[in-house]
Image (cartoon, grey):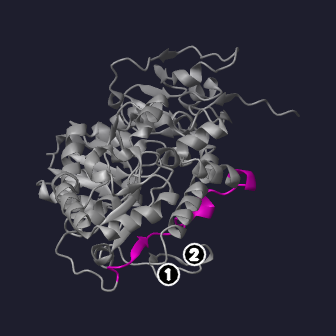
Amino acid sequence: MKRPERIRIKNESGQPQSLPEGERYFQDLGGAGDILFLGLGPDPALATQLFPQAENLYYMECPGLAAQLPEGYTIPTGFTQITPDAALDLSEFRVILYTPGKRLFPSFWEPLLSKLTVARAGIMRKERSRTIWIPGNEDSLLVPELCRAFDAEGFTYRVIEPDAMRKNLLYLLDGELPEILLSINFSGLDNAGETFFMLREAGVKAAVWMVDNPFHVISGIKSNYWQEVPTLVTDHWFIQALEDHGAKKVGHLPLAADPAIFNGNIKPCPQLDERTVFVGRSSFPKKDNFFSGCTFNIEDEKAVLQAIENDSKPNFEWWAKRDNIARFWPGKDVRSTGFRTEQSGLLWRILALRSAGKELTVFGDEGWKQYLPDADLRPPVDYFTELPGIYSGAGISLNMTSPLLPCGLTQRNFDVWATGGFLLSDYTPGMSIFPEELLKHCTFNVPAELPAKIEFIKDNPQLKKELSKNWQELIMSEHTYKNRVHKLLNFLN
């Protein structure tokens, strides 16, 4: 006997999927009153059979799904449709959810379900506290710095394990109703948007700060709910790109310095005052897993080296044009362009370090040995305890910005100057936040410029001292995480 053909539709991210059929796909969410189905599935007659004694049956359907239903799909008599734009209090009904619908069109169903959940829990009756929640742990990226900065602004902060945020949010909100949730790179937020929509329904100002390439961050998200999330990026190049992909509120928030870690009262690391120092990895953790299946061939390498020879840095924008990639989301295709960009960055760093001269010291992973066999290679250092002294004691600290952020900056652009050290960085348009007169002797455009730049700095110790002082004053007055918190609060208001 031939099996009946299932109804196939495209979900909200454009991927084709079948509509599962059967009683087990209907979940009773409870409540009293008339019965309301949130989605009827591929066979509406089955929904009728679930409640044969009911006098009144209501249903709501996602417009994105309804528009794809085939001819012959009919709603049994006895059902009354409720349109999504109707002023509706779901708590007045006994609600039955067709569960696959939530997975197929989460951006439509999750806000409705969050409204129901928050209303039933009575969360809005609680008093809101001047508290910020930050998903992560005490050692997570930027969490310690942000906690200190918000504490200085009179906020109580709470660091919440990301899995607990996703799994126990209702319990957490029952104990405390915060003012703000700030997620770094979507940490603590689920891929369907349930966490975000529930926070929003509870009146929490939720935002995401993407400190890496945003399209890498969202490449694993299949729902378009991320477009609703107020988003900050460290690289302003991505503002227009994210808006072109549907993001509704995007702002620029660069990295900064934390005076509690990097400041002028640090004991300099000895025997580095005549050295050019670079502190950094040859590749980021789990790189191979993230870029699984991506390629970078010999022709790609030749193109990169030729571009650098022609005084150009092959960054993410450069590769997107070369790969002719028009859309960065949905899907993971953007990672192929990202991988070639990442490999370009490795070549850029290698060429820069090889151009830095014989007085080079590199603190980093074992991967540098194959690229810099003659350099003074030392083990990785702890960011919070050892790194400040290295920056303070180094003759010159080098910075090479990841080309994954065309206009980005790194922590070195702030931390080195905060310690009273001296930074020589490759130039990106992101440096427009700094005065132009401070950049002239502290930046290079291509690795070939480094020998002359380093020699000039060594030959002009008084100028170097003055630049360090001016940079330190600038960073400490305008570019600390306290400054960034002020900007973030304005963004959320």
Which residue is most to the front?
459
User: Can the viewer see residue 398 in this picture?
Assistant: no
Q: Which of 91 and 53 is in front in this view?
A: 91
Few, some or many residues within 10 Å of mark 2 (<14, 14–19, 20+): some
**Mark 1 and mark 2: span between their CA atoms?**
8 Å
Task: Give the quarter of the image for residue 233.
Answer: top left
Left or right: residue 67 versus residue 265 is: right
The residue tagged 1 is 377
Q: Which circle's residue, 1 or 2, is located before the other in the chain?
A: 2
Count up the numbered dots.
2
Task: Give the quarter of the image for residue 407.
Answer: top left
Whether 253 is among the magenta residues is no
The amino acid type found where label 1 is placed reads: Leu
In the figure, 358 relative to 348: above or below? below
Is mark 1 in CB contact (under 8 Å) with mark 2?
A: yes
Left or right: residue 121 versus residue 67 is: left
Tag 1 secondary structure:
strand
The residue tagged 2 is 372
Q: Nearer the viewer, residue 107 or 489?
A: 489
Which segment is the magenta one? 272-300
Residue for point 41% across, 51% down: 427
